[in-house]
């Protein structure tokens, strides 16, 4: 079985949907310019660099579990006020260290959201804010169902006997409950439909093989089998009413740690 680490160069190139969503979240983060902010799940650093531009007197700590992502982020977010750290967002190595924690396209990769929000609460200073967006609710439900059918096909089924989903797509209601249980106040959560359409099969395959299909492809034995799985997935998407469209839903999260 192949490593589950990301191909960060490919992600940096194909992740325009995530980057666009993240920019809109970043616009909602109120900053004076001197804060210390954690980018939790900084990925390849595209948004980390934009966040650093808004903190001329402050500092950004970009944290990611992927070594390959951090290597790419070092080039993308090379400003003097950026520090990059390898770590798990559900087990942050910080206590009362940040004025704000910003995160996009990351929390759905964490299966234990109780641990996640407890860790984030502890890392914020009193009065600090969490502003995040991740996949939620019915996120890529059609794509996941399509992948499940492929996993059951005779040529692939042997490689998925003990398959477990690597994602947790929480609802706004259960997320709000978990945030309040962790100690947060001023909690706001909500779902936003955000379909992503690609111009052709080539672009669709490049994106899905790097992002959505990565956990599936890691199970397959060789490049030929991985290409066959990706090609079949794209062929099915070509026949949709909106060809090469991924049914993304984003879960928006805003909460504050109490000042006292």
Image: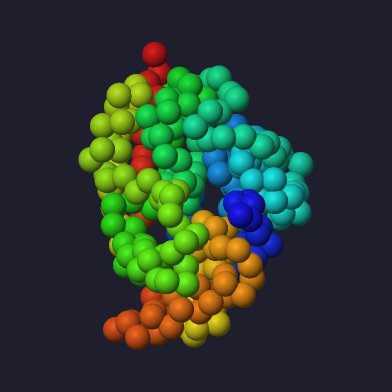
Residue 193 coordinates in the image, percent (x, y) = 31, 62
Q: Which colour scheme is used?
A: rainbow
Q: In this view, does 136 lie above or below 102?
A: below
User: Residue at position x 34%, y 58% from top?
Assistant: 139
**Viewer-nearest residue: 218 or 110:** 218
Residue at the farthest top position: 260
Left or right: residue 187 versus residue 29 is left
User: Residue at position x 62%, y 75% from top?
Assistant: 224
Left or right: residue 93 versus residue 139 is right
**Viewer-nearest residue: 91 or 148:** 148
Q: Residue 197: tell me if it is visible.
A: no
Residue 46 coordinates in the image, percent (x, y) = 62, 56
Q: Is residue 170 above or below residue 119?
A: below
Q: Residue 92: tell me if it is visible.
A: yes
Q: In this view, does 158 lie above or below 102?
A: below
User: Residue at position x 27%, y 46% from top?
Assistant: 171
Quadrant occupied by the N terminus:
bottom right
Circle count: 0
Residue 230 coordinates in the image, percent (x, y) = 51, 74
**Viewer-nearest residue: 94 or 150:** 150
Q: Is residue 129 above or below residue 95?
A: below
Left or right: residue 50 versus residue 149 is right
User: Which quadrant holds residue 35?
Assistant: top right
User: Residue at position x 37%, y 29% from top?
Assistant: 114
Residue 72 coordinates in the image, percent (x, y) = 72, 54
Residue at the farthest left position: 173
**Viewer-nearest residue: 260 or 142:** 142
């Amino acid at each position: 079985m192949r490593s589950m680490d990301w191909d960060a160069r490919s992600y940096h190139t194909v992740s325009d949907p995530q980057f666009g969503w993240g920019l809109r979240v970043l616009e909602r983060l109120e900053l004076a310019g001197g804060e210390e902010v954690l980018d939790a799940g900084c990925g390849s650093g595209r948004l980390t660099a934009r966040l650093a531009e808004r903190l001329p007197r402050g500092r950004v700590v970009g944290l990611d579990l992927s070594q390959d992502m951090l290597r790419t982020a070092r080039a993308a977010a090379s400003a003097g006020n950026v520090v990059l750290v390898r770590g798990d967002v559900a087990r942050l190595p910080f206590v009362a260290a940040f004025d704000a924690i910003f995160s996009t396209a990351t929390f759905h990769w964490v299966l234990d959201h109780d641990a996640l929000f407890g860790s984030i609460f502890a890392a914020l200073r009193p009065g600090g804010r969490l502003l995040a967006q991740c996949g939620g609710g019915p996120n890529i439900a059609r794509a996941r169902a399509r992948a499940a059918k492929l996993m059951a096909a005779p040529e692939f089924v042997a490689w998925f006997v003990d398959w477990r989903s690597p994602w947790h797509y929480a609802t706004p209601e259960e997320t709000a409950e978990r945030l309040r249980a962790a100690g947060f106040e001023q909690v706001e959560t909500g779902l936003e439909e955000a379909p992503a359409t690609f111009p052709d099969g080539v672009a669709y395959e490049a994106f899905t093989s790097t992002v959505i299909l990565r956990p599936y492809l890691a199970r397959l034995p060789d490049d030929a089998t991985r290409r066959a799985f990706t090609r079949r997935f794209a062929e099915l998407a070509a026949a949709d009413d909106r060809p090469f469209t991924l049914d993304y839903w984003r879960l928006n999260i805003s909460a504050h740690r109490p000042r006292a």
